[in-house]
Image: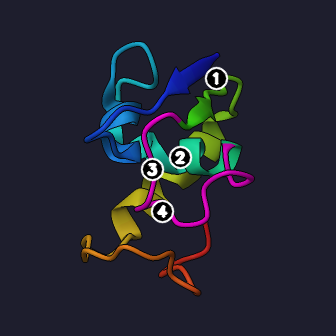
Amino acid sequence: SRYNVVKGDSLWRISGKSNIYANSFKWPLLFRANKDIIEDPDLIYPKQKLEVKKNYTKAEVDDAVQKAKETPPFEPHSTPRKKLPIKY
């Protein structure tokens, strides 16, 4: 399925929605599925159409949740980082 980004959205908020993953810590799954349009997981924009994949293995989901927990706290920035803090 697809999700249309609106103002104020973040991958954290979107993945927490009950019709997406119902768990904000699964946001790396959204990032992985949309790397072709998202350069930096902190920077998404209104009107982007995100693909929402649901056919991940338990190992992939567990890995995504672990990576979300390892991600450093958000630091505001307006341009994509050249190097992400961890490999998603």
Image: 4 above or below 32:
above
Within the image, what quadrant is residue 13 found in?
Answer: top left
What residue lies at 52% left-to-right and 51% top-to-bottom? 28
Q: Relative to 2, is 85 on the left or the right? A: left
What residue lies at 36% left-to-right and 24% top-to-bottom? 22
* Amino acid type at image mark 1: Lys
Task: Please rate how many residues cluster around mark 1, counting C-alpha atoms within 10 Å: few if below 14, some from 14 to 19, many from 20.
Answer: few
- Asked if the residue at tag 4 contacts the one at tag 3, i.e. Cβ–Cβ closer than 8 Å, the answer is yes
Q: Nearer the viewer, mark 3 or mark 1?
A: 1
- Report helix, strand or loop for mark 3: helix
Residue at the front extreme of this rendering: 47
- In this figure, which residue is indicated by the disc labeled 3? 65
Task: Please rate how many residues cluster around mark 3, counting C-alpha atoms within 10 Å: few if below 14, some from 14 to 19, many from 20.
Answer: some
- In this figure, which residue is indicated by the disc labeled 1? 54
* Amino acid type at image mark 3: Val
* Amino acid type at image mark 4: Lys
- In this figure, which residue is indicated by the disc labeled 2? 62
Image: 68 above or below 58:
below
The percent coordinates of residue 82 (x first, y second) are: 58, 86
Say which label, 4 or 2, has the lower sequence index. 2
The span from disc 4 to disc 2 (Cα, nearest Å) is 9 Å
The span from disc 3 to disc 1 (Cα, nearest Å) is 15 Å
The span from disc 1 to disc 4 (Cα, nearest Å) is 18 Å
- Report helix, strand or loop for mark 4: helix
Q: Relative to 65, is 77 on the left or the right? A: left
- Asked if the residue at tag 3 contacts the one at tag 2, i.e. Cβ–Cβ closer than 8 Å, the answer is yes
The stretch in magenta equals: 34-47
Image: 60 above or below 42:
above
- In this figure, which residue is indicated by the disc labeled 4? 67
